[in-house]
Amino acid sequence: MKIILDAFGGDYAPTEIVKGALLGLYQNPELVIYLVGKQDVLEQELNGKKYDKERLIIVPASDVIEFDDSPVEAIRTKKDSSMVVAIDKLKQDPEILGLISAGSTGALLSGAVLKLGRIKGLNRPALAPLLPTATGGQVLLIDCGANMDTKPLNLVQFAVMGSVYMKKMLNIENPRIALLSVGTEDSKGNELVKESFKQLKSLPINFVGNMEARDALSGKYDIIVADGFAGNVLLKSIEGAFKLCMEQIKGTIKSSFFAKIGGLLIKKPLKKTLKRFDYHSFGGSPLLGTKRIVIKAHGSSKAKETLIAINQLIEIGSKNINKDIETALSEIQFGEQDEAN
């Protein structure tokens, strides 16, 4: 069982990525990790640490794609960057399950589509993170930023991919699929939403209608379908609201002596609740629809988040989700084709 880690992607690379890789080896005795990046730096990070050198293999890459680089240009010109080398190695070795990178989202998407290709029958891949819900479950948001401009066909295919993913990964037999809109009424939304609504209703999936953003984490839905622009706004809003709440709660508890006493009394249940809504604990965002498994880890991933993403990749790989997505797409007659496959 082999995977690839882009060791120089993310805010805390390579130190935290290396720590996460070592944790992954410890938890998964059969795992082999290819760590891609600047060899001298990685050797220094690993110096003095105990690990099986046959299971943690450095793949040299002299360059790094920065967050402010033009995604497509970076993939084409920075051929010896850690991300491009990782993608190329994944493409060349069929025994590797997939790759993880916390680096530039745009570059990872561009590289995956250009170099790995799409699943047969799919027009566009989509990023699909899991988010916590008020009922203790999880909801899949698809898409959250891979496609800024979409057509109804894309949203319909996102729904099909999301349905397969939730069935396989969370064992939800008939996942409830909602379309992100400005109201729950069938007639609400822009032209994209209205046309997508019509097509989603005709599919053999459990489409339950439109959904307002305020209900995203309510637990009423298993899948939220959105174009990448609206989905990314929703995701960033949730992240910002969670961060703001955390800061306000901490500030309130520290505001007075009695507040501190109260804080101590509710510390355990409060910590448990906040932990349940920590989106970092749900792993990265798989790029559903590419021929090989690619996971975009959060840019601020540390060792813990890297480990979660590693285990997520292993689970996705073991369940043969890509094949099931291809089968599901082939069984549905879509109403339009806006791009050549």
Image (cartoon, rainbow, N blue to C red):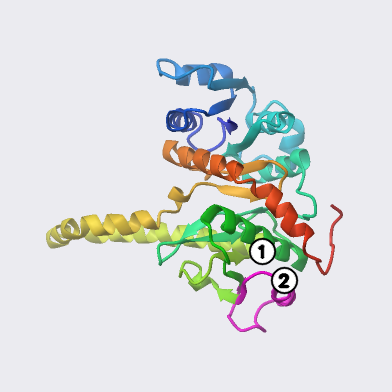
Whole-percent x, y for residue 189 in the image: 66, 78
Taking the spot 25% from the left edge, 59% from the top edge, the residue there is: 269
The x, y position of residue 258, in whole percent, is 12, 62
**In the picture, residue 339 is in which quadrant?**
bottom right
- Three-letter residue code for mark 2: Leu
In the rendered structure, which disc, 2 or 1, sits on the residue that comes first in sequence? 1
Q: Amino acid at mark 1?
A: Ala
Of residues 176 and 250, which is closer to you in this image?
176
The residue that appears at 52% across and 21% down in the rendered structure is: 42
Marks 2 & 1, CB-CB < 8 Å contact: yes
On the picture, is 50 further left or further right than 272? right
Q: Nearer the viewer, mark 2 or mark 1?
A: 2
- What SS does tag 1 mark? helix
Q: Nearer the viewer, residue 254 or 138?
A: 138
User: Is residue 254 something one can see in this rendering?
Assistant: no
- Residue 191 colored magenta? yes
Name the residue that disc number 2 marks. Answer: 203
Q: Locate residue 236, reporting x and y percent.
A: 52, 58
Answer few, some or many: residues within 10 Å of disc 2's Cα (few below 14, many 20 plus, some between 14 and 19): some
Specify the segment rendered in magenta.
180-209
Of residues 13 and 141, which is closer to you in this image? 141
